[in-house]
Image (cartoon, grey):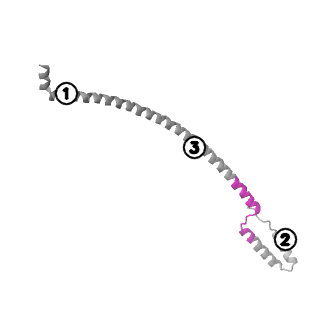
Amino acid sequence: MALVAFDTQQVVEDLEKAGVLTSHARAISFVIRKSHEAVDVATKRDLDDLHRDIDARFGKTDTAIAEVRKDLSAAIAEVRKDMDVQFEQVDKRFDQSEKRFDKLESKFDRIQWFLYAATLGLLFKEQITRLLGI
């Protein structure tokens, strides 16, 4: 921050012209100078500089956020593509499994009818042999 210019010699001379003793004028000048040094006051220029710095940082931050959003959007799109491919593969596997289950179901139906026929044959063995004359 900028320091306010303070000419201690000029203050001493001005006080002496006003009738203040030199020792008192020097003491007053010293106290005023110390008070100026102790106070850390922001000037309008300091605030303007700070404002520009903040604007620049926000600009950089906005740019960085936009880049991250762009990167994330691209990554999300890529993940979605991968997921679509994977889902298609899973759908194909389900279709294949469904076809195999259909084949198994038809085989089980044939086995079931064979078992019915065998069971009926065993139950009616005597009647069948009599009918056929065996």
Near-viewer residue (49 or 38): 49
Q: In the picture shown, does residue 129 fall above or below 21?
A: above
Is residue 46 in the magenta section? yes
Kindly give the residue lying farthest to the right in the view shown.
Answer: 17
Q: List x then y, in percent, for residue 14.
A: 86, 74
Near-viewer residue (36 or 90): 90
Q: Residue at x 73, y 64 (%)?
A: 42
Label 1 or label 3, whichever comes before in sequence order: 3
Give the residue type at disc 3: Leu
Give the residue type at disc 1: Ala
Q: Secondary structure at mark 3?
A: helix
Asked if the residue under mark 3 is in contact with the one under mark 2, i.e. CB atoms within 8 Å, the reply is no
Q: List x then y, in percent, for residue 125.
A: 14, 26
Q: Which mark is residue 78?
A: none
Q: Residue at x 88, y 77 (%)?
A: 17
Q: Report the span colored magenta.
A: 35-55
Q: Secondary structure at mark 1?
A: helix
Q: Residue at x 11, y 25 (%)?
A: 126
Near-viewer residue (98 or 78): 98
Asked if the residue under mark 3 is in contact with the one under mark 1, i.e. CB atoms within 8 Å, the reply is no
Is residue 64 in the magenta section? no
Q: Is residue 132 visible?
A: yes
Distance in Å between CA atoms under marks 2 and 1: 130 Å
Distance in Å between CA atoms under marks 1 and 3: 67 Å
Residue at image mark 3: 72
Q: List x then y, in percent, for residue 7.
A: 82, 68
Residue at image mark 1: 118
